[in-house]
Amino acid sequence: MTLRTCSYENELTQALKNGHWPEGCGPELRAHVDACGSCGDLVLVTRTFQRARSESEHVALCGSSSLLWWRAQLRRRNAATERVSRPITIAQTFALFVNVFVGIVFVASQYRHGLHWASWWSALAPLRALHSLPIGSGQIDWNLLLLVSGFGVLALLSLVVVYLASEKS
Amino acid sequence: MRKTDTTGAYAIPNVETRVASRTDELPMDSDAFAGFYQRSAPALRAYLARVSGNPTLADDLMQESYLRFLCASRPEGGEVNYRRYLYRIATNLLRDHWKRPRAACLEDVPEQFLAARDGLSRIDSQAILDPALARMRPRERQLLWLAHAEGYSHREISEITGLSAAGIRLLLFRARRKIARLLRKQIDADRGNT
């Protein structure tokens, strides 16, 4: 299909847009429209669509503007709240990953040295703990203290992360 | 033919945008919006209903268009630019709707919607336009409505739809010839019946 542009097209488009067609147009343009198929199409299509548009102005609308305005305000505030809480979410995710990483490293390091869970358990027993206190023995069992404190910190951090995650959800 | 920026949203050239100074406040107060809504909503609804062929969908998309319009950073330059921006949002929503796999495809919108389910079709001039529109593709309806009902230039339609101005010129030329032929047939048929 070849695209042929009529020299009168711009003038005619402007006249139609401004509502000057046909009364406000000269006889030369009107005679041209009668003879030119492309301009005839333009007039027919534009006037039909313009009528359809002007008739649609009288159709009742659903929904009130004030309701839309309040919904938009609510949506905008929710978006703002989400933006503000995004760093907290990132920090929570980061903390979770750090915890998991520390846990994996800890288990891996212990696995390399051999897992002596039975001896740990007996070391954790209250009597043994009391016995190993520096007050009684005069020596500090650093391995045991590190192990217990490590587990304690890990458990505490995990609890905090779980709490924050559940609060968020 | 289509031009998009990196975010996938269509860019409006030569229209400056601004971000609202406070994120929890809308950039337009309730009264100003009410006036703008009253002036622009009927035309926007007509556009969405005619192009989608589904008045219910048109109502939904119209409300979503206004919500997004209010929440987004609006272009400066007054109501003319607001309207163009609103049409751009509505056009993007229409395209998103058509792209959704569960929804009807762009080319498969039931054409009988155009004639049967919209209250506008009872009006006489619509009786001529509706059957002709029903035989047009949605993209053609979109371009024809923007060009001939709204009076937008090729450049403005390009900004709204994201298509190139040269492409719009060709598509519009073909669509106009096609619908003019259909309208003439319809008018002749109506004359034959009376």
Image: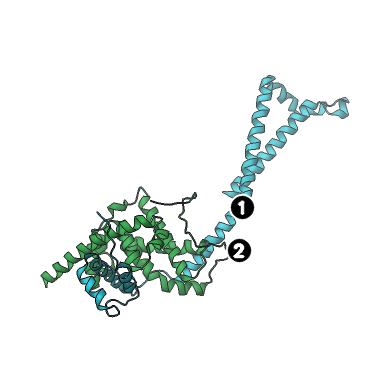
Residue at 69% from the left image edge and 21% from the top image edge: A116
Instruction: Identify the chain drawn in green.
Output: B
Q: Nearer the viewer, residue B41 or B191?
A: B191
Q: Nearer the viewer, residue A32 or B41?
A: A32
Residue at 74% from the left image edge and 31% from the top image edge: A148
Query: Disc number at residue B89?
Result: none
* Image coords of residue B79 (percent x, y): 47, 71
Q: Circle 2 — which element?
A: loop
* Image coords of residue A1 (percent x, y): 24, 54
Residue at 35% from the left image edge and 52% from the top image edge: B98
Indicate the amino acid at tag 1: Ser
Q: Quadrant of residue B163?
A: bottom left
Q: Which residue is mark 2?
A: B22
Q: Which residue is mark 1?
A: A85
| Residue B3 in the figure: left or right of residue A44 | right
Q: Nearer the viewer, residue B147 or A91?
A: B147
Q: How is the image coloured?
A: by chain
Q: Circle 1 — which element?
A: helix
Colour in which chain A is shown? Answer: cyan
Indicate the amino acid at tag 2: Arg
Evaluate whether residue A70 shows in this view. Answer: yes
Evaluate whether residue A59 shows in this view. Answer: no
